[in-house]
């Protein structure tokens, strides 16, 4: 509910908050008491703190088992080298939750999760990505050059990181659905208000059946997507199986976000296409929703595997 409200105003801000949630989820699920005390407490303090999740690599997207950022065991800790891309809050976060491999040939079973405080040497911020939408969300590359990470910064048991990541993603997909619903709702409400104020041929646009019916269709789809999001979140709270519902919420939310923002621009006409009009921003922000948290094709594969 919080993310929907944030996204209805600025999806970039919602993306920053979602990145925080992603980064802390592995710590909440499998972190030690000391890790939780050190890294979770500051995020709920009055002083602003950000966290980041580093997973995607320049040559690796949804094929998580193929990550090449390498963690080499050293006395008392690990040395990590590699690069991560599209890291929201990357380079400006207080800490980064990072996934690396100890042996690329082991694929899933070789993945481990680490907490990297921002003050560790060897971490360099690379290119800051310029994006079509969610521009408020600072997104950058992270370059890691023999970063020394102590053993106490390892999250969970060896061999458990892949399952931990999947659980984090399953939760995150429901949250992405919430962001999408917020975007769709904002676009719908703007278009509705515009259609009632804008007069053409002697009457408001809303008096045209084609406009009114279009808005009615959007409202039905937004409500349906919201209920899918709420169902997935309820299942998470009840500690029940939420893998497929979360994927369904993400797909439904991203579809209606893109449909509603495009329809709102059509209803607003040329005004909606202008820089400075909220609809123009909503449309740019909505485009990424079918790509993040695993593309919608990946979500469909997840859903199909659960049928």
Image (spheres, grey):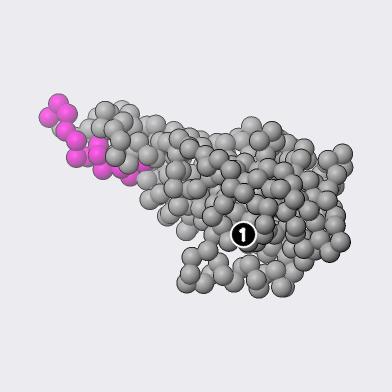
Which residues are the magenta region? 187-202
Q: Is residue 60 visible?
A: yes
Q: Is residue 87 visible?
A: no
Query: In the depicted view, which residue is nearer to us: 138 or 134?
Result: 138
Position of residue 175 relative to residue 208, above or below, is below
- Residue 299 image offset from top left, x and y in percent: 65, 38
The residue positioned 44% from the left and 43% from the top of the image is 135
Q: Is residue 172 left or right of residue 240?
A: left
Does the magenta-highlighted stretch encompass residue 154?
no
- Disc 1 is placed on an element classified as loop
- What is the magenta segment's predominant secondary structure? helix
State which quadrant residue 149 falls in.
Answer: bottom right
Q: Quick one: which residue is furthest to the left in this view? A: 202
The residue positioned 66% from the left and 73% from the top of the image is 37
- Residue 48 image offset from top left, x and y in percent: 48, 65
Query: In the depicted view, which residue is nearer to us: 260 or 207?
Result: 260
Dot 1, crowdedness within 10 Å: few (<14), some or many (≥20)? Answer: some
Query: In the depicted view, which residue is nearer to us: 49 or 143?
Result: 143
- Residue 232 image offset from top left, x and y in percent: 60, 52
Position of residue 116 relative to residue 203, above or below, is below
The residue positioned 29% from the left and 39% from the top of the image is 277
Query: In the depicted view, which residue is nearer to us: 112 or 301?
Result: 112
The residue positioned 45% from the left and 39% from the top of the image is 133
| Count of marks overlaid on the render | 1
Q: Is residue 210 left or right of residue 245?
A: left
Q: Quadrant of the C terminus?
A: top right
- Residue 236 image offset from top left, x and y in percent: 64, 58
- In this figure, which residue is indicated by the disc labeled 1? 118
């Amino acid at each position: 509910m919080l993310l929907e409200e944030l996204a209805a105003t600025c999806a970039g801000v919602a993306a920053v908050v979602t990145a925080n949630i992603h980064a802390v989820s592995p710590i909440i699920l499998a972190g030690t008491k000391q890790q939780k005390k050190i890294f979770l407490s500051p995020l709920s303090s009055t002083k602003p703190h950000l966290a980041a999740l580093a997973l995607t690599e320049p040559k690796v997207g949804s094929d998580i088992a193929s990550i090449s950022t390498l963690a080499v065991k050293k006395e008392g800790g690990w040395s990590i080298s590699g690069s991560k891309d599209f890291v929201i809050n990357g380079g400006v976060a207080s800490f980064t939750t990072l996934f690396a491999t100890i042996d690329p040939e082991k694929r899933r079973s070789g993945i481990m999760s680490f907490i990297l405080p921002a003050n560790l040497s060897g971490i360099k911020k690379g290119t800051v990505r310029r994006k079509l939408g969610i521009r408020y969300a600072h997104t950058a590359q992270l370059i890691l050059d023999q970063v020394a990470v102590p053993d106490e910064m390892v999250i969970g048991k060896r061999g458990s990181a892949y399952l931990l990541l999947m659980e984090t993603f399953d939760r995150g997909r429901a949250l992405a659905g919430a962001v999408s619903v917020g975007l769709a709702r904002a676009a719908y409400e703007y278009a509705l208000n515009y259609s009632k104020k804008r007069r053409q041929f002697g009457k408001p646009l809303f008096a045209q059946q084609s406009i009114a019916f279009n808005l009615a269709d959007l409202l039905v789809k937004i409500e349906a997507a919201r209920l899918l999001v709420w169902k997935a979140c309820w299942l998470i709270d009840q500690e029940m199986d939420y893998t497929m519902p979360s994927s369904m919420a993400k797909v439904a939310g991203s579809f209606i976000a893109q449909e509603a923002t495009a329809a709102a621009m059509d209803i607003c006409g040329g005004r909606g296409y202008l820089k400075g009009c909220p609809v123009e921003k909503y449309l740019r922000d909505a485009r990424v929703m079918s790509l993040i948290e695993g593309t919608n094709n990946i979500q469909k594969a997840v859903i199909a595997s659960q049928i």
